[in-house]
Image: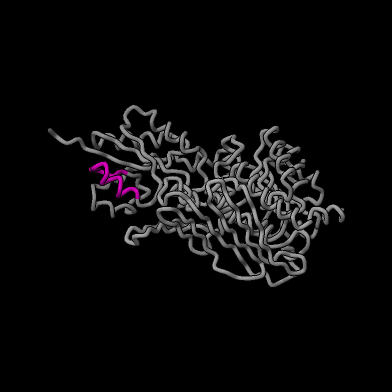
Amino acid sequence: MKKEKVIITYGTYDMFHIGHLNILKRAKALGDILIVGVTSEDYDRSRGKLNVVQDLDTRIKSIEALDFIDKVIIEEHQHQKEIDIQKYNVDTFVLGDDWVGKFDYLEEYCDVVYLARTKGISSTSLRKEIKKIKLGIIGTGRIATRFSKESSFVDSIDIKSVFSLSKVSVENFLYKHGILYGFTDINQFLLSDIDAVYIASPHQFHYQQIKSSLNAGKHVLCEKPIVLEKKQLLELLTLADKNNLILLEALKTGFFPAFNKLLDEINKGVIGEIKEVKATFTKLISDHTLREWQYPYGGATLELASYPLLLAQKILGTPNNIDFYPQEKNKIDSSNRIVCQYESGAISISTVAIGMKSEGDAVISGTEGYIYIPAPWWLTKTFIVRFEDNHKEYSFNYELEGDGLRYEISEFVSLITRKRTVSNRITHHDMLNINNILSKFFNLKGYIDEVDRNK
C-alpha cells in the first residue's frame, strides 16, 4: 500500500485572509495529508511579533474551519519544527517565499518548499488599517521615558498626550518624544482624545489617578505597586468591572514568554510538588535624594517586592501567613526579607534591597527537582530544569527584546483590541494577593498613620 504523503506548514494566521487560504490550498496539493502549526502568543512574542490582533483560539478555529486541513497543532518554541517533522513522519515542509533559505536546515529531515505569497495582501497590511489605541501618559520620569521608547515596537498604539504637574517637565517630554499634546491639568488631560492611560507617577498618586481615569472611561495600565492599600484596590477593581474597563498592573515580568513557559513547566509537574520559591531582587541606589529613599513612600519593599511576590503568587497562590524581616536606614527599609507560608506547607522567601547587593537569581524547589532562573531572574529569558540525576537537566532559552516593557504594552493593547478586561498573565486575583502583602507591610510600619497626619 502506497504511503500517504504528509505535508506540514506553520504560521500565525492572524486576521485570516485570501493569502493564507491560497498558500494552504497549494500546500495541500503537494500531498495527501496537511498538518498546520499555529504559533502560540508566547512564541510569537518571543520572536518579536508583538502586534498579533487575534487570540490563539480564534486563529486555530479559522484553520480548523477549512475542510481540507487534516490536523492543527500549536507551535510553542523554535525547535518544534524538527521535532514535529519526525513525530508525524513528514515528507515536505512548506512555507512562504519570504522565508527563502531560512529553513533549509530542515532538508536533513524532509523536502523544503517555499511557495510564492499572494501579492498585495498580508496580515501586516491589514493590521495597519485597524484603528490605533490612543494613549495618554501620566508622569514624565524615568519609567515613562522608557515606556514611550518601547511603545514604538507595538504598531497598534499611538501616544497622544502626557500629563504632569510640572509645565517644564511636560514641555521637555513632548520635545524629546515627539508627542503632540501636554497637560498640567488632569481633568483636561482625561477629556482629551485618548482611549487609555498609562500611569507612571509616584506610588502615592496612583489611587486617585486610576479612579479619575476609570471614571473618565479610560482603560488603565499602572506601574507597581498599583496602590498602597487593599481597600483601595478592591474599590478600583470594582469600578473597572462596573465600567467594563481594563485595570492592569504593569509588572512586566508576568508578560515575558520565558516566564509563562516556566509556569507551564511547573504546572505540568516536571519538578513534582513545589515546596519553596526563593527569589532575590536587589539594586544599589546610592543617591539618597531619589524618591526610593524618601519617607514614607520609598523603600525596598514598595520599590521591588512586587516582582518576587509575583513569582510566588503565580506558583503558590494565596499565603496564610506573612512575616517581614526589614533592615532600616532613616526610617526607610533598605532591605527586607518577606517569608510567606501556604496551606500546602510550602514557603516563599522574597529578598529585596536598595542598600545592599546580592545575586539576583531565583530557585523553585520541588519534590522531584528544581528550576533555576539565573540573574537577573526578573528579566526572565532562560531557566534550567535540574534533577538528582544531572544528566536529565534541560533548559529553555527565549529572546527578550529591549528592557521588556514592550511585552506588557502588547498585552494591554491586545486586551483592548479583543474587548477583554482581564489578563491571564496578571489577573485581578494576582494583583490583590500581591497588594495584600505590600499593604500589610505599609500598615505594619505605621506608614498609613504618618500619611494621614501629613494630609
Q: Is residue 326 left or right of residue 37?
A: right
Q: Position of residue 73 (x, y in %)?
A: 36, 39
Comparing 293 with 106, the one in front is: 293
Q: Is residue 139 visible?
A: yes
Residue visible at 46% across and 35% down in the picture? 57
Residue reaching furthest left?
A: 1
User: Quadrant of residue 335 in the image?
Assistant: bottom right
Q: How is the image coloured?
A: one colour
Residue visible at 25% across and 51% down in the picture? 107
Q: Is residue 205 left or right of residue 98?
A: right
Q: Position of residue 326 (x, y in %)?
A: 68, 63
Is residue 322 located in the magenta-colored stretch of the structure? no
Q: Is residue 142 left or right of residue 3?
A: right
Comparing 418 with 313, the one in front is: 313
Is residue 88 located in the magenta-colored stretch of the structure? yes
Residue visible at 69% across and 45% down in the picture? 197
Q: Position of residue 375 (x, y in %)?
A: 51, 64
Comparing 341 with 39, the one in front is: 341
29 w.r.t. 186: above or below:
above
Q: Is residue 155 visible?
A: no
Q: Which span is picked out in magenta?
A: 80-94
Q: Is residue 134 left or right of residue 109?
A: right
Residue visible at 60% across and 48% down in the picture? 319
Give the position of the N terminus as an image quadrant: top left
Residue reaching furthest bottom?
A: 286
Q: Position of residue 88 (x, y in %)?
A: 26, 41
